[in-house]
Amino acid sequence: MADINLRPLADRVLVEPSPAETKTASGIIIPDTAQEKPQQGIVIAAGNGKKDEPMTVKAGDRVLYGKYGGTEIKHEGKDYLIMRESDIFAIIG
């Protein structure tokens, strides 16, 4: 787990996206311009939730989210997404 000094507020979640697929199942290399945005990642940090709405996800959960969900941020050279918990579709595993 990454040790990061960002703490999301309220119902926000900080997610580290999984790396994009660089090769197809048959071995064809996908150029950067044609790679799909990842739609899953690992929760790095989660806020405390809203009043009467506790958070469901927690740090370490692998989650599935929308292709264009969240806001991309760069912190200490790494890419992250910050999004509302409602933008997360499912917890994987």
Image: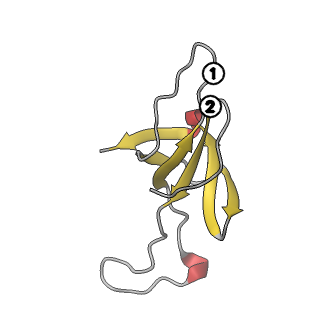
Q: Is residue 26 above or below residue 12?
A: below
Pick the front one: 57 or 29: 57
Q: Quadrant of the N terminus?
A: bottom left
Residue drawn at point x = 62 percent, y = 64 percent: 79
Pick the front one: 31 or 19: 19
Report the Cα–Cα distance between label 1 and label 2: 6 Å
Residue drawn at point x = 55 percent, y = 64 percent: 37
- Asked whether disc 1 touches disc 2, contact meaning CB atoms under 8 Å apart, the reply is yes
Q: Dot 1, crowdedness within 10 Å: few (<14), some or many (≥20)?
A: few
Q: Is residue 26 left or right of residue 11?
A: left
Q: Is residue 36 above or below residue 39?
A: below
Where is residue 81 shown, x and y percent of the image? Answer: 62, 53
Where is residue 88 shown, x and y percent of the image? Answer: 52, 40
Residue drawn at point x = 42 percent, y = 47 percent: 60
Q: Amino acid at mark 2?
A: Asp
Q: What residue is shown with label 1?
A: 50
Q: Which secondary structure lies at badge 1?
A: loop
Q: Which secondary structure lies at badge 2?
A: loop
Q: Earlier in the sequence, mark 1 or mark 2?
A: 2
Q: Amino acid at mark 1?
A: Lys
Q: What residue is shown with label 2?
A: 11
Where is residue 30 shown, x and y percent of the image? Answer: 48, 82
- Quarter of the image for residue 9 reads top right
Where is residue 17 shown, x and y percent of the image? Answer: 52, 59
